[in-house]
Image (cartoon, rainbow, N blue to C red):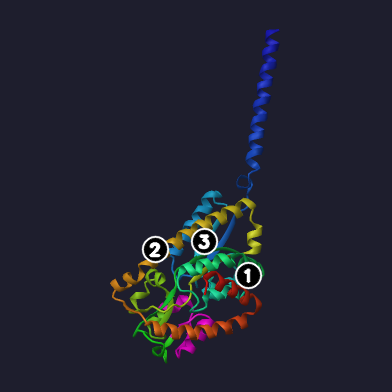
Amino acid sequence: MKRKHLYKVSITITVVLLLAVISSFIGASSSPVAAQTQTFKWRLAIYDAALTTIAAKSYQDMAKGISDRTNGKFQITVYPSGQLGYSAADHQKVLSQGLLEMGETMAGTVQGAPGFLVFSYPGLFKNVDDAQKAWKAVEADLQQAAGAFNAKLLGHTFRGIAGIHSTKRGFPTVDSFKGAKMRAWNSMSSDILAALGAVPQVIPYAERFSALSTGIVEGNTAAFSTQVDSKDYEVCKFTNVWPWDSTLMVTFVNGNSFNALPKEYQTILQEEMTKSVQRSAKEYLDVDSNALNTLAAKGVTIVRPEAAEITKYLGVAQKLHDKWQQQGGDQAKAIYKKVRAAIGY
């Protein structure tokens, strides 16, 4: 009797252990990360022309975080602008066409959604606080607008309010722009430079340094933090403190590519992207807060236009705001109205 009892107990223990192993295996297999056999390989084209900038390093950290959390099943390779054959200004366009999984660009280069362009209206924002208030007021609208070109807005970063850096001379007055060859990067920058009497020349971001160093142009607009981060002070010996645009960088993912990811991977991507842009935004604003002192220490002459000249410039800009809203239609008008209400002027 004792033998039979022990035999039954042994069988019972074996069955229990077997069931536990099977249950554990099923539980592990039900996890999207554990069950995922497909490897996703994405390309992320960033706006900067080098992988050594604040944003580039932050994106590479993001890619590592995603790879680590998915056991190498979701890999993102970061490419500087131009390396994949696309201009930084075209990242959103080629992404919407499905030729790129993920891309970063300036808000002012977004095509097919004129609401984004409002953040690149020269003379609209006094400081980054204004721009951030405006973003909160219209973020949901811009996310919806991104859906219209088969994209998801994954993150944004303000690098600071742009000024103008120049190679041969400063620009202390509105009249001093007359005849100056200046880099333009979209229709709005061309419009305002022409209105100020300058000669705008559209040059891709990746080519701006060589264009400045060889004299093709003598000036470019950029956030002060970007001037430090990209070392443009090596060729630009003047920084002119005009309130230009908000230097808003936006990062999109192709809608089809995003939807093809397992839900857990989508969450991981969004979480790591949020950490990335928060990290780079803080670094850029930290650099920006002391950028003029840093540039001065590098031998750059800081040119500060008088208040009367700034007022004259803002008058020119406001007339163009009206023009750009008309060109942008209802979306641009609605976003502009919300932005002005958010910043209170």
* Residue type at tag 3: Thr
> What residue is shown with label 3?
77
- In this view, the residue in front, 343 or 25, is 343
- Mark 3: few, some, or many residues within 10 Å (few <14, many ≥20)? some
Residue 211: percent from the left, percent from the top? 42, 82
Residue 232: percent from the left, percent from the top? 37, 75
Quarter location, residue 285 = bottom left
* Residue type at tag 2: Asp
- In this view, the residue in front, 296 or 58, is 296
Q: Is residue 23 magenta?
A: no
Q: Mark 1 against mark 2, which lies toward the viewer?
A: 2
Measure how far apart labels 1 and 2 are at the Cα level: 33 Å
Q: Tell me which segment is drawn in magenta.
A: 182-209
Q: Earlier in the sequence, mark 1 or mark 2?
A: 1
Residue at 64%, 32% in the rendered image: 21
> What residue is shown with label 2?
286
- Of helix, strand and loop, which one carries label 2? helix
Residue at 44%, 72% in the rendered image: 161
